[in-house]
Image: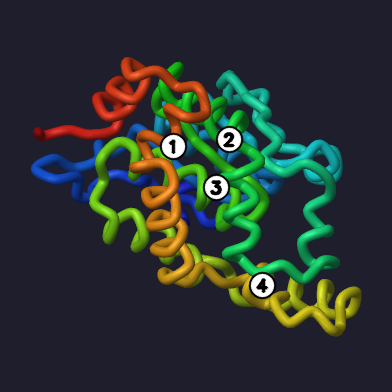
Amino acid sequence: MTDLVPGAVNFRDTGGLHAGSGVTRDGVLFRSGDLSRVRDAGIAALRTLGIRRVIDLRADDEVARSPSTLRPLGATVQHVPLFFGSVTSFFANDVSLAEMYRHIVDDAGDAVVAAVRGVLADQPVLVHCTVGKDRTGVTVALMLAAAGVDTDDVVADYARTERLLPAAGTAAAVAFLRARHPQAKHLEELATRSPAPVMQDLLADVTARFGSPADYLRAQGMSDDEVTELRRVLIAGE
C-alpha cells in the first residue's frame, strides 16, 4: 500500500479493521504523511483511488515550506492546522509522545472535529500531516475508535507507521534534529516512533475522562447524528 501512490510517505488505507461484528470499509479513509513529492504518477494514483477530499493537518509554516501540488487532482483540500505554534517547539521543549498527544486531545479538539467533519463531507478522503505519525495518528485513531473499531486494531494501525517510514529519510531527520537539540531525550521517539503502549494509554485516558472516544467528540461539539454517521461511513458488515 505504501507504494500505491508514488511520492507519498507512509500512505495506507484504513480498511479491513475489526469493529465488533463489522469491519472498516476499504477505499473510504486513507492516511499518509507528506504529499509535497507527489507528481504526475502520484496524482494519477490518487485519482484512481477516487480521492475527493484531502485534509492537511500541517501548520501554516509547514505548508509554505513544502506545499502539496494537488491542484490537478481536482479534490477539495481542507487545511486544518492541528498544532498551535511551531512544530519544532515540541523538540525544543523535549516533550514526550504521551505529552504531545495529550496536548492534541486537550487543546486541539476543534481541529479534530473539523477533520472528522471533513471525513463525513466527502469520501474517499485522505488525512495527512508531515510524517503521518502523530497528528494524523491521533486524529485517525480517535475517529476510528469513535466509530467503534476495536481498540487493538486502532492501536495496531497507529503502530504500523514505525515500520513504514523510510529508513534513510528517518536517519537524516534524526541527524538534522539532533544537531539542533543535542540534549533532547525524547527526540528519536518524537521523530520516528509509534509505540503501541502510547496509543493504548491515550485511548484509555480519553475513555476515563470523557466516557469513550465518541463521547470525546461529542464534548468537542459533535452531535449524536454526526457520530452515528461516522460509524455508517466507516463501518460495513454489521
Out of 113 and 174, give the one closest to the viewer. 113
* Foreground label between 2 and 3: 2
Q: Amino acid at mark 4?
A: Thr
The kind of secondary structure element at disc 1 is helix
- Residue 71, image quadrant: top right
Q: Earlier in the sequence, mark 4 or mark 1?
A: 4
Q: Quadrant of the C terminus?
A: top left
| Residue at image mark 3 | 136
CB within 8 Å, label 3 to label 4: no
Q: Earlier in the sequence, mark 4 or mark 2?
A: 2
CB within 8 Å, label 2 to label 1: yes
Q: Quadrant of the N terminus?
A: bottom left
The kind of secondary structure element at disc 4 is helix
Within 10 Å of the Cα at label 1, are there few (<14), some (14-19), or many (20+) other Cα atoms? many
CB within 8 Å, label 1 to label 3: no
Instruction: Report the Cα–Cα distance between label 2 and label 3.
Output: 14 Å
Q: Which mark is residue 109?
A: 2
| Residue at image mark 4 | 170
Q: Earlier in the sequence, mark 2 or mark 1?
A: 2
Instruction: Report the Cα–Cα distance between label 4 and label 2.
Output: 29 Å
Q: Amino acid at mark 1?
A: Tyr
- Where residue 38 appears, as percent x and y from the top left, is 64, 44
- Where residue 124 appears, as percent x and y from the top left, is 40, 28
Q: Amino acid at mark 3?
A: Thr
